[in-house]
Every structure is written in structure tokens, then in C-alpha cells.
Amino acid sequence: MNSIVATGGVNGKNIKIGLSIPVFIASLLTLFIGAPVLGLIGVWAFLLRGEINPLFLKNLHGYLSWLAVIIMISSLIIPSLNLKPLFRKTAIVIFFLFAPLYSLFATLHFTVAEKWSLNLGFGELFVSAYGIGAFLLDILLYAVIFLISLLAAGIKIPFLTSDSQQSSKYDLRSEIQIPRIVFLVYAIFVLIAFIVGLYNMLMFYAQLKPVSPAALVSFHSHIGIFAMGIVMGVLTLKAVGAADSKITIGFRVAAASLILTFFGFLGFIVLDLQSGAWIGPAKFFFLFMVFVWLGVWGIWGIKPSGYHFTFVRTALIFTWALLLLTTSLGPWVGMMYVEERDLTVTFYQEDQELHIGPFPDPRPGYYPGTAPDRGTPRGLEDFHLSVGGWLFVANFWLLALLIFGDRIFPLLKKPNLIFFLSVIIAQAPFLNAIGRTGTYLGWPHGPGPLILAAHPIKTFTIVLLTVIGIVLLKKLKK
């Protein structure tokens, strides 16, 4: 049987990877609002003052930060889609406006808006005009993301595409091709993750109830992260020139792991099985990540391209190695501390030294805040999620440099800037990891490397990449 890379997967076709500069900038804007703005508001306004960081702020920070990765993936596939000009422009506008409007509406809903009770038959929702606005924005954004992902998977959708080539001068293109089936798997499971998140929002957050079973939160996040990880892994292997037959093996392992993890979560949540029901198949996803890391070393084949190739690939070797470390902590926390569906290590639990217990009451005055990191499973979870999230972003940025760097930076007349970017992109999550480690172990000023070094470097990188994107737009316009 021929490999999916050779045959192209869906309809025997592949899709070429490009880079939509406007959508890439929109992903940077989303990340800037989610990480430096909302994240550091939580740190400096609440945590460092010894106050409880509001749950909505914590959720917004994580949500927008991961959403930036999804928008980044959209920026890689839009250039190869023959989109109708109206749909393309509408999608770009939505990508740009979502983060500022959604964060504004959500903040107003949870802080100043007067709420009224709305009973839709499945519970009493506490809503506001701002909350409804945020909900509608969510639906609109994911409709666009899902439609673009289906088009990348080779599924034709009337009224959205044109038979003629609809190119944009603000798009870069490459010769790297990804099997469309990769994006079919991605589209399906990102949609599932969104549906689970929507269920959590309607059944718990909007009703001011604790999420129960607490595993619904992990179900929502892990399914979506695994789906993004498949795209990231396959694209990494293709970018370094791994053999198509080897990429096929890696993709099949990852897809099978994702599907089995999905059903494992259902057994964990619905049938009250032990956490091994989903952690077992999830371990095969870790094997896929090891497979990708070996591929970046060149074990599965390598095709150097561009004067910067070896340097950027070395940065990827480093970030993927660190990602393996952070990923390995997830199964450990799940098997050791969250073996039952209604347990979490995220939140403060009274009279519990390790703070293992149910999701807390989210109502004002009842919410106890997150558990301390020092010597608790929460510290391991923070290392797992925070450093891991930063590494996903870093990997996609490095892939953009690897694939398009030899075209972008000579055009900007700054050919060596790519080496500086490769260093600081890889450095930020590493310093985050040092800060998380110091906090967990109780070192003096343990979180210092994270707060005083990692955050500024990551913020600087976001701003620098945004400036590069804007300058590139002006260059491409001429």
C-alpha cells in the first residue's frame, strides 16, 4: 500500500503549505492579548500580590494562547485555497477582531455587567449582553476555522471557493506538501474539542457551577492539542525532508492514538473507568513525538534547503527535546493524582496538602483560587501545560523560519536576523521551564527566570515578529 504522503490522502491529493502574512499577524495579535496582556495582568495584579487570580482571567489567558496556534495553522493553509475574495477578507477580519472583542466582552461580562437568568430547559444560565456577544463571536470564529480546515482536507464547499486561482500578493508559498487527510483528522477533532468546550461553558461556567466530572476540562484541551500536534509533527517531518514512508508511519500512529484517546476519555468520563483508559492510548502520541524528534535529527531522511537550514533545525531539535520532557509529565500526573474522573490538581483544596479534589465552586466569594505550585502536583501540571504551550508556539514559529526564512529576510535586507530569532524563540520556553522548576522545588526567587526573563523575551519576540510581518506586507505590496 502506498503511503498517504505519496498518494495524497483525501482524493489522492496533497495541499501545499504557504503563509498568509495577514493571518499570521492576526495569530500574533491573539497571542499578544492572551499571553503578555491577560497573562501578565493575572501575574502582576493578583498572584504577586497574594490575591486570587480570577478564574475567567485564567481561562481567557489559556484559551487565547492556544487559539493563536489554531489561527497560525490557518495561516499555513489559506494560501493554497481558492477562496472567494469575500470569504477570504471576512475570515481575515474575524481573525483580527476576535481576540480584542472576545476578551473585552468576556471581561465585562464577569466584572461589571448585570446578569439575568435564562432557563433553556437544561439549566439556569446567568447571561448578559456582553456574554451573548462573546458566545456569538466564538461560534463565528470556529465556523470559519472549521470551514477552512475542511477545504484544506479536500472537501468542496459551495459558495466559498472559486474554480479559478484566487491568489493574494500577501501570501507566500512553498513546495512542501501535506496530505489532506492530516487536515481532515485535524478538522474533526478540533470540532469535537470545540463542542466539548461549548458544553462545559453552557452546562457549568454559564450556570456558575463547578465542572463535573472535572475530566471534561482535560477532555476538551487534550483532544484539541493532540489535533494541533498531528499537524505540527507531520509539517516538521516534511520541512526537514523526512522520507514519505516514514511520515506515513508517524501519522498513522498519531491518528490512531488520538482516536483511541478520544474513546478512552469517553470511558473515563461516562463509564467511570480509571485514568489509564485514556492515558494508555495517549502514550502512543508521545511515541509519535519521539518519532518526530528523531526525524528532526535527520534519522528518517533530510533535505537541507537554504543557508539557515542547519541553524533553525538545531533550534527545533532543542525545542522538541524540551517538549518531550514537558509532555511526559502529563501521564505521570494523571496516573498518580487524577486517577478518577472528578479529581483535579489545579485548584486549592482546603485541608489537602497536595490539593487533589473536585473542581471548586466558581461563584464569587466561593472560588478558592489555584493550588500553590511548590511541591504539589499543580507545579507539575503548570510545567506540563505552560511550558508545553510555549513550545507549540515556538515550534510553529521555527517552522515558519525554516520554510520561508530564505525568502523573508533577504527581502527585508536583514538575512542574519533569522539566527537571532531562532535563538530567542527557543530560549523563552527554556527559561519558562527553569522558572517552573524553581517554583516547584522551592528555590529562592524560583519563578524569577519565568517572570523576569521568559516573559519579556516572549513578549519581545511577538512584537518583533509583528513588526517583521507589517514590514513584509509593505514590501509585498510594491
Image: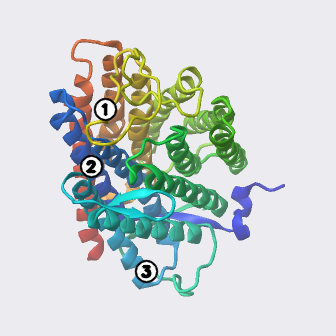
- Using the image, determine if residue 368 lies above or below residue 98: above
- Using the image, determine if residue 136 lies above or below residue 348: below
Q: Which residue is mark 1?
A: 369
Badge 3 or badge 2: first in the primary sequence: 3
Cα–Cα span, label 3 and label 2? 27 Å
Relative side of 47 to 120, left or right = left
Number of dots carrying numbers: 3
x then y, percent, for residue 450: 27, 29
Q: Which residue is mark 2?
A: 462
- Using the image, determine if residue 43 lies above or below residue 117: above
What's the amino acid at mark 2? Ile
x then y, percent, for residue 472: 28, 64
Q: Which mark is residue 87?
A: 3
Cα–Cα span, label 3 and label 1? 42 Å
Badge 3 or badge 1: first in the primary sequence: 3
Front residue (pair 100, 218)? 218
Q: Is residue 401 visible?
A: no
At 55% from the left and 23% from the top, the residue drawn is 332
Front residue (pair 23, 121)? 121
Q: Which mark is residue 258?
A: none
- In the picture, the quarter occupied by the C terminus is bottom left
Element carrying mark 2:
helix
Q: Residues within 10 Å of mark 1 (few under 14, many from 20)?
A: some
What's the amino acid at mark 3? Phe
Cα–Cα span, label 1 and label 2? 29 Å
